[in-house]
């Protein structure tokens, strides 16, 4: 029996000799003999290194998103403060003498 693990990012189906398909979710494994798998029925299940690469890319994307959120939050606070100052100046300048 050979162990087949889906390292791809989505579900993959292994076509079986009995005409059915065994679906594997990402990270799921199944043990099948060569005779249980239909000819040409084994899809590209990816490589174990694909999972590590995807996790690294997701972590980098998350870090970039957090940095962008922090920058936008800081900019938003500065704009609100500026807006409040300008509103106070407008109120002072538009008061009747």
Image (cartoon, rainbow, N blue to C red):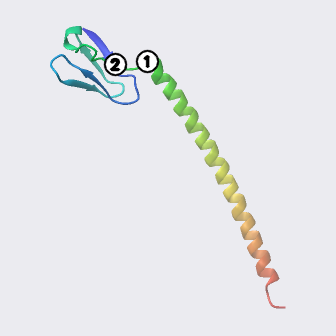
What residue is shown with label 1? 48
**What residue is rendered at 30% in x and 17% in y?**
42
> Looking at the picture, how far across and down is residue 14, in whole percent?
27, 21
Q: Residue at x 59, y 37 (%)?
A: 63
Q: Residue at x 54, y 33 (%)?
A: 59
Q: Residues within 10 Å of mark 1 (few under 14, many from 20)?
A: few
Please tell me in which quadrant of the rendered image residue 10 appears.
top left
- The residue pinned by badge 2 equals 5
Left or right of 58 in this view: 42 = left
Give the vertical position of 35 relative to 70 (above or below).
Answer: above
Return the residue found at the far right: 97
**Residue projecting furthest to the front:** 40
Instruction: Tell me where residue 74 appears, x and y as whole percent.
Output: 68, 53
Q: Nearer the viewer, residue 42 or 66?
A: 42
Q: Residue at x 23, y 24 (%)?
A: 22
| Of the pair 36 and 25, the residue shown nearer to us | 36
Where does the N terminus fall, quadrant-wise?
Answer: top left
């Amino acid at each position: 029996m050979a162990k087949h693990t889906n390292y791809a990012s989505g579900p993959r189906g292994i076509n079986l000799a009995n005409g059915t398909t065994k679906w594997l979710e990402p990270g799921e494994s199944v043990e099948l003999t060569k005779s249980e798998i239909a000819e040409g029925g084994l899809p590209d299940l990816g490589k174990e290194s694909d999972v590590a690469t995807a996790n690294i890319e997701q972590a980098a994307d998350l870090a970039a998103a957090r940095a962008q959120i922090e920058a936008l939050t800081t900019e938003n606070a500065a704009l609100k403060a500026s807006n409040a100052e300008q509103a106070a100046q407008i109120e002072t300048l538009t008061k009747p003498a």
